[in-house]
Image (cartoon, rainbow, N blue to C red):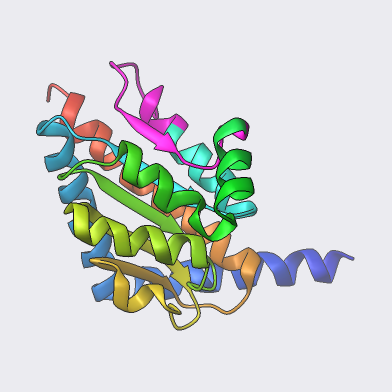
Amino acid sequence: MKQTIQDTIQRSIAVKQAILNDENCIAQIEFVAKKMIDAYKNGNKTMFAGNGGSAADAQHLAAELVNRFCFDHIGLPALALSTDSSIVTSIANDYGYDFLFSRQVAAQGNSGDIFVGISTSGNSENIVKALQLCKEKEIYTVGLTGGNGGKMASLCDTCIIVPSNETARIQEAHILIGHILCGIVESALFRKN
């Protein structure tokens, strides 16, 4: 059991070390942070979407922005598109689960907003459809994926691909990247010094 614990921690560290050593990945995270800062300065919002564990990550990151991350400040507008059970079930019932996020983007998304699609495979059809609609609405799209990026790699304005094929390690890296973004955005908008 001890060896399993140590091996799992080592695999998690290895993925994060690979991200740390990837200048392109670091530059992508920095660029997305700047896009989010600009969006907030212009009165826009961030929408997060994901399924399963990625839905939990979407909800987690939206909460960090709406409430606070490291220090007190006024909240930033952010939505997790998987959290309203009435909306989720009505769309799934009337249109199908593949339209879960695109229907919400159609209703709530505006030009200048940021959409963050989270999918370890990069192939979640409901996120793919939302990304396609975001293009039409001039919403900047960010993907958090793993493996080879899947379909999302070519659909996102910026697609941050975690260098792993192991779902749990990808999800751990996604929340790290999300926390980095929240911290940078919060500091840029609210720190006095």
Q: Is residue 156 left or right of residue 42?
A: right
Magenta segment boundaries in residue numbering: 63-85
- In the image, residue 186 lies at what x, y percent? 26, 32
- In the image, residue 105 lies at what x, y percent? 35, 46
Residue at left offset 49%, top offset 45%: 58
Q: Nearer the viewer, residue 164 or 87?
A: 87
The vertical placement of 129 against 78, above or below, is: below
Q: Is residue 65 magenta?
A: yes
The quadrant in which the N terminus is found is bottom right
The quadrant in which the C terminus is found is top left
Task: Tally the marks.
Answer: 0
- In the image, residue 2 lies at what x, y percent? 85, 64
Q: Is residue 113 magenta?
A: no
- Would you say the magenta stretch is mainly helix, strand or loop? loop
Q: Quadrant of residue 25?
A: bottom left
Q: What residue occupies the far bottom of the structure in this picture?
A: 148
The vertical placement of 128 against 33, above or below, is: below
Q: Quadrant of residue 190?
A: top left
Q: Quadrant of residue 26?
A: bottom left
The vertical placement of 134 against 170, above or below, is: above
Residue at left offset 30%, top offset 58%: 133
Q: Is residue 11 left or right of residue 66?
A: right
Q: Is residue 12 left or right of residue 74?
A: right
Residue at left offset 31%, top offset 65%: 132
